[in-house]
Each structure stands twice: as C-alpha cells, then as structure tokens.
C-alpha cells in the first residue's frame, strides 16, 4: 500500500464539495494533498482555498486540470461533466467524478471511450456502494432463496431541509427558507425546456417530442434515483425489461416496474413531499423465507449509520435482526477507494460498467413513461 499523499485538484466548490468531500480530504493530510481548487464563483473559491489551504485557486477549471502538480481531479461541479472529464483524460489526470458520469447513453458511451483511451483511473461517485451496511446487505440478499421482489421508495423533502446545519461558504450562516414547491417545479421545467441547461440531455434520454413532465421525471431519475438504480444493479446485476412506468405531479412523482428475469421484479418509487422534514429512502429485497431492508439516511447527514433489517424464520419463530453495521462515512470510503485505485491499482467496488448500466436502465424507464414496455438494451 502506497504511503504518500495523492495530489488532487477539486473542480466545483459548492454544497456537496464543502459538506462532504473537502472535509474528508482535509482530515487526512497523510493521504491527500489539495493542490488546486476551481469554481465559477470567485467568492466561493476564495473561501474554500483559505479554509482548506489549497496552494492554487482559479475560476477556470481547466487551470486546475492542467496544473502540473495535480495528478488526480475531483470533478464535483453540477451539470454535465462531459467537457471537463474529457479535458482531464486529455491531460492524463486520474478522475473522480460525481454522478452522473454522463447524462444519457450517448454521452456516457463517449466518456467511457475517452476514459479507456486515456489509460488513467476513473471512479464515479456512487457513495452508497461504499456504505458498510450496503455491503453487508448484499451478502444477505445473495444468500436468500427464491428472491422475488425489490421495492425502492424515496420520499424526498425540500432539499435544503437537510443542508441547513452545514456551513457552506461564502454564506456559512444563511438561514433555511424552504423553496415554494411551485418555484421548485418551475425551475426544473425551465431546465428541461428548449434553451435550458438540461434540455438536450433529457431529450436524448426520453425522446425529443416527449411531454414536459416526462423530461422532468427523467432528470430526477438521472440526478436522484440514479443512486438507488446503482444500488439495485450492484446487488442483482443487469435488468431485462421495464414493464411499465408512470409519472404524475408535473413529473415530481414516478414509479416503474422492471423485470430482472428469473422471477425477480423491482419497483422504483420517487415522490417529492416538501412539507415534512423527513427524508426516507428504503430498499427492500423480498423472498418467501427472508427479507433484507436498507433505510438510507439523508446523504447530507455525516456519519449516520444506515439501519439494516434482516428477517428470517427460526423454526416457527419470526426473527427480526436490527443491525447497525458501522458509523463509517460512505463519502469518505469512496475517496479512500479512489486513492487506492490510483496509487495501488486493483479493482474498485464501482467500475466503468456501472455508469453505462445505469444510463441504459434510466433511458428504458424514461421511455416507458409513454406506456410501452422497454427492453434495457
């Protein structure tokens, strides 16, 4: 195991960078050296550079990517990562990139081609795959006989409700004010409409002539439900066919049913419920003689364990095990895994097969909103 720090540059100094990634880099100077930070906002990059001691700061992400001391780039900016990821590959920089790797199948295929041609290492930020409870649950699910059903349900409150306790610079004491639901819906609709930042990508995912609510729901699939899509694929492998999919409430609610073959079906449910500050994300694996349930906490709550519930029969007794596996932070785990991948090689929990498999399943669900089953090609 290599003992030297990995020299990193961070592109994107917003919420998730400050709430999770930067603190985990900073707490282990023996493992990481923060060389450069970049953000389009000068005040944000100034604050982050001062707090975390970056030697170099810039509002031009390419300067961080090209910096001669940077050997690995953490691409944490929101929106499409295509141009900056390809720049990292062009300059032979290892890449950790927040999900989604690509916003549609075509974009993902292009990025995978660039990644493989570059010869550098890539890790996509599916932090739940590094959650100790998830890893234990996967073992338990694979020991179940005759798995029949998987149920995913996300009840999503207003996003800011779980971020307010973090100090996000340059406004560390900003009070929490819930975004009116109508404004939240309108903003997403604008993003997927002609001229919007996500119009092209969502048109590729769901089809250019799809109704507006289908494009909204596709964006939620790509940016939120993608974590659960990846978790389910990490346990079951690749799905066969999306049997049905439906969206309502202007695209801010959806469900789908997917056939994995061998008698296993999975439902994905996502509903915006902004009034109640209670984030719920449950993944259940159900067989006749056993059930395994993960209840993921909000991703903005640091070091919160993911409760694991395992049900089985012992003779005539129904046994319920409530397990707390670890207080280890999954965001920390993925960064440490990235460092190991870059410096020591080997195979990571998440591979380049993951973003491709996710993009294909997302596209099949989004196109099934029109009412016809879709093969997951």
Image (cartoon, rainbow, N blue to C red):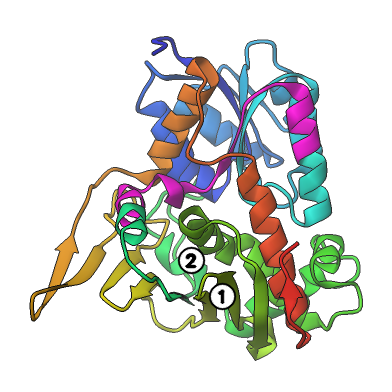
Percent of width and height locating residue 130? 41, 44
Please say whether residue 60 is visible from this viewpoint: no
Q: Quadrant of the C terminus?
A: bottom right
- Pick whichever of labels 1 and 2 is earlier in the sequence: 2
Indicate which disc residue 179 carries.
1
- SS for tag 1? loop
The answer to whether residue 161 is left or right of residue 15 is: left
The answer to whether residue 30 is left or right of residue 80 is: left
- Judge by depth and name the residue closer to the eye, 326 or 81: 326
Q: Do the numbered discs 1 and 2 sit on residues whose CB atoms are within 8 Å? A: yes
Q: Vertical placement of 211 versus 120: above or below? A: below
Residue at 62%, 81% (x, y): give it: 252
- Crowd tier of the residue under label 2, counting other residues whose Cα lies within 10 Å: few below 14, some 14–19, many 20 or above: some
Q: Quadrant of the N terminus?
A: top left
Q: Vertical placement of 177 versus 25: above or below? A: below
Q: Which residue is mark 2?
A: 160
Please say whether residue 56 is visible from this viewpoint: yes
Residue at 35%, 63% (x, y): give it: 297
Q: Which residues, given as a range, are shown in magenta?
A: 112-137
Percent of width and height locating residue 202? 80, 66
- Judge by depth and name the residue closer to the eye, 98 or 34: 98
């Amino acid at each position: 195991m290599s003992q030297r720090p990995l020299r990193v540059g961070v592109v994107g100094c917003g919420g998730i960078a400050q709430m999770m990634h930067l603190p985990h880099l900073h707490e282990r100077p023996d493992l990481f050296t923060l060389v450069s930070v970049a953000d389009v906002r000068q005040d944000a990059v100034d604050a982050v550079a001062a707090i975390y001691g970056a030697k170099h700061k810039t509002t031009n992400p390419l300067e961080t990517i090209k910096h001669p001391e940077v050997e690995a780039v953490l691409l944490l900016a929101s929106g499409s990562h295509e141009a900056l990821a390809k720049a990292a590959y062009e300059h032979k920089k290892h890449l950790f990139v927040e999900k989604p790797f690509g916003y549609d199948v075509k974009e993902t295929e292009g990025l995978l081609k660039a990644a493989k041609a570059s010869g550098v290492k890539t890790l996509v930020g599916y932090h739940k795959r590094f959650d100790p409870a998830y890893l234990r649950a996967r073992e338990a699910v694979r020991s179940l006989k005759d798995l029949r059903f998987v149920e995913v349900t996300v009840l999503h409150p207003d996003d800011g409700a779980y971020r307010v306790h973090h100090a996000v610079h340059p406004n560390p004491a900003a009070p929490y004010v819930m975004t009116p639901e109508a404004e939240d819906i309108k903003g997403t609709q604008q993003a997927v409409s002609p001229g919007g930042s996500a119009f092209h990508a969502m048109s590729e995912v769901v089809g250019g002539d799809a109704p507006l609510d289908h494009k909204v729901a596709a964006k939620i699939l790509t940016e939120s439900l993608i974590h659960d899509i990846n978790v389910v694929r990490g346990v079951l492998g690749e799905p066969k066919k999306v049997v049905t999919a439906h969206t309502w409430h202007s695209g801010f609610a959806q469900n789908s049913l997917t056939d994995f073959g061998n008698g296993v079906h999975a439902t994905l449910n996502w509903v915006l419920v902004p009034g109640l500050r209670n984030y719920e994300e449950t993944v259940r694996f159900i067989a006749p003689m056993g059930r395994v349930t993960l209840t993921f906490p909000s991703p903005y709550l640091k070091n919160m364990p993911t409760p694991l519930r395992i049900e089985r029969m012992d003779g005539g007794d129904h046994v319920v095990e409530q397990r707390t596996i670890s207080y280890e932070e999954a965001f920390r785990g993925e960064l440490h895994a990235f460092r190991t991948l870059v410096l020591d090689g080997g195979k990571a929990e998440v591979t380049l097969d993951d973003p491709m498999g996710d993009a294909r399943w997302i596209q099949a669900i989004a196109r099934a909103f029109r009412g016809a089953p879709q093969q997951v090609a």
